[in-house]
Image (spheres, rainbow, N blue to C red):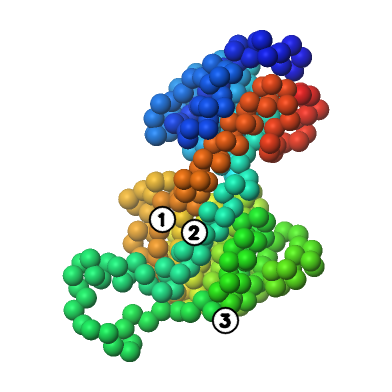
Amino acid sequence: MGSESNPSTVRDFTVYLTRRFPEPVSRILEPLFEITLNDSNSPVGRDELLSQLETADGLLCTLSDEIDGEALARAQRLKIVSTYSAGYDHIDVDVATNRGIYVTNTPDVLTDATADLTLALMLALSRRVVEGHNLIISREWDMPWFPSFMLGSDLSKKTIGIIGFGRIGRAVAKRARGFGMKIRYHNSVQVSKAVEVELDARYSPLETLLMESDFVSIHLPLTNKTRNLISYEMIKLMKRSAYLINTSRGMIVDESGLADALRREEIAGAGLDVFNTEPLTESSPLLEVNNILLTPHLGSATVGTRYRMGEMAASNIRNVLLGIEPVSLVNSEVRRRRPL
């Protein structure tokens, strides 16, 4: 970046924040750069985003902000888009790369929190935790214990099929082993034998995994290949006693097809933390079925995880604007367009 990396000129850089972010963001960025922000928990408006991008050197955004070709065309000074998320499908990475704009994300730091939530959904569904809670709160628990009362499903000795065996998928496998579950996985590339042995995991074709698993858990990025991958036809392959869990991206699952399968009791239930549209609209078919557990995108929602995400996202911006390699780079090809 030449003279722009000189510490005496860093105050000339402006960084736009599309949200209020945790404390590490201001601590890392404010001493070095001019900061402008959408001082709200609500998404920034499209017009405001486009306006701010005209003068921004760095952008810190979230999954809710669409950083498409139109937005990037307005960003004449932009050097980095840092997303406060592991996923980056809301950013047109190809356009950014062609314009010499670094794209960074926050992988790794949310792995454990998301894997924990996955197991929480599995347990809550299979042991009918929310149903039991609601029964008591609604004052409808009017009979003492009896042998067939609110029977659920075991996790022990059941098979979990993990679709996507990256960081989070493997973290889920590690936790599932602790419950004595059998691990099957499907991935675009079969992992090494050493990883399979470590996690006692066996590769399965997708259709076989769906047919044989008692729990199916999705841990994929959203791409053209994975959009609507779990269609109604795929869901119908699952056991009637099986549960579908999705803590990755909503658009991987055909929500209407899932609602139909649940309504017809073609699977036992589903636990979803992500959706096609967030928040869910009142017309969502998912709100019309009973054998479902919905959480409002809580995968990374722990204090420690969100803190570390802020630290990484802000550090990526700081590094690129100072001419230093970022912590996590999505588009490595950009180095040829704009060497640091």
Q: Is residue 321 left or right of residue 21?
A: right
Q: Is residue 275 left or right of residue 284?
A: right
Q: Amino acid at mark 2?
A: Leu
Q: Amino acid at mark 1?
A: Thr
Residue occupied by mark 3: 157
Q: Nearer the viewer, residue 175 or 118?
A: 175
Q: Residue at x 28, y 88 (%)?
A: 146
Label located before the other in sequence (1 or 3) = 3
Label located before the other in sequence (1 or 2) = 2
Disc 3 on helix, strand or loop?
loop
Residue occupied by mark 2: 117
Label located before the other in sequence (2 or 3) = 2
Report if residue 248 is visible in the image: yes
Q: Residue at x 34, y 52 (%)?
A: 283
Disc 2 on helix, strand or loop?
helix
**Cα distance in 3D space between marks 2 and 3:** 20 Å
In which quadrant is the C terminus drawn? top right
**Cα distance in 3D space between marks 1 and 3:** 27 Å
Q: Amino acid at mark 3?
A: Lys
Residue occupied by mark 1: 295
Residue 8, placed above or below residue 333: above
Tag 1 near tag 2, CB within 8 Å? yes
Please tell me whether mark 1 or mark 3 is closer to you in this view: 3
Locate residue 162, reporting x and y percent: 62, 66
Disc 1 on helix, strand or loop?
loop
Q: Residue at x 43, y 46 (%)?
A: 278
